[in-house]
Image (cartoon, rainbow, N blue to C red):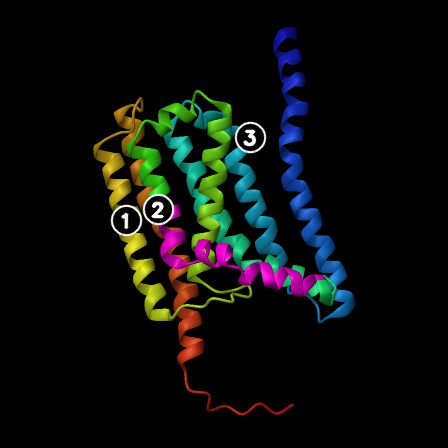
Amino acid sequence: MVHNHVHHASELPNELLLALPFVLAVLIYLLLGLVSNQRHKRWPIYRYICWVSGVVSAAVALIGPIADLAHENFTAHMVGHLFLGMLAPLLLVLAAPMTLLMRTLSIGHARKLSRVLKSFPVSIYCHPVVASILNIGGLWVLYTTELYSAMQHYALLHMIVHLHVFLAGYLYTNSIIYIDPTPHRYSFIFRAIVLILSLAAHGVLSKYIYAYPPSGVPIGQAEMGGMIMYYGGDIIEIGLIILFCRQWYKTARPRTTVSIS
């Protein structure tokens, strides 16, 4: 009993240390919101909710019970993947962090940030095709090669894979639905085609995992993981589709109403 108590006590500072970036992410966003509200109209409450929910979703995947279990259990790993690679990016994109940052910065710094966003490297990574290849292609590489097995044995590789899954998910979501300022905008038709192909590739991969488990993964866990990826992914993707279609409708509808101010 004493040994267990000491073990858990030593684990606690590590957990707190891992939680620190997530706490800072929330605090910085709230601070930016407070500064922004001094100069502009109030920042919407739902954006704060989206940001906090997105940060919590990412944290659930990386620290705590699901993250601990994911090292040995593929089903838990796949739950973490949905939180980190799909749900967190969608919620964080909806929080419009770049818009908030632009509202908070001085005009000079905002212009510098704008130049960075318009730069060639950023425009490449934010291209819907490139972002979807990084996102879905990265998952195909992870689950159809020895990479999944290798990441369980090397802490640095484990961290790099998780960082890629999150960033690729964010870039992909950001390239499909435009919430933040996007200098290089692509048509709804083009983005719809990329979205449909990406959804198909994600669905096929989940079925592939079900039929051909990644190296070292028991069949039962692979089947359950494949189903979670397929059906859980569908739920989050439906949210993305609804938002995309809503934007398309708002842009395409005829403006017959006259607002009186």
Q: Residues within 10 Å of mark 1 (few under 14, many from 20)?
A: some
88 sits to left or right of 228: right
Viewer-nearest residue: 66 or 115: 115
Left or right: residue 44 versus residue 149 is right
Q: Image point 37% across, 52% down: which residue?
A: 132
Residue, far right: 38
Depth order, front residue of 232/18: 18
Q: CA distance from mark 2 to mark 3?
A: 26 Å
Q: Mark 1 and mark 3: span between their CA atoms?
A: 30 Å
Closer to the camera: disc 2 or disc 3? 2
The image shows residue 237, relative to residue 211, as above or below, that is below
Split into 4 quadrants, where in the image is the C terminus? bottom right
Horizontal and vertical percent for residue 158?
A: 47, 29
- Residue 136 - label: 2
Q: Is residue 19 visible?
A: yes
Q: Quadrant of residue 260?
A: bottom right
Q: Earlier in the sequence, mark 2 or mark 3?
A: 3
The residue to which callout 1 is attached is: 201
| Residue plotted at (41% across, 52% down) | 131
Which SS class for mark 1? helix
Under mark 2, the amino acid is Ile
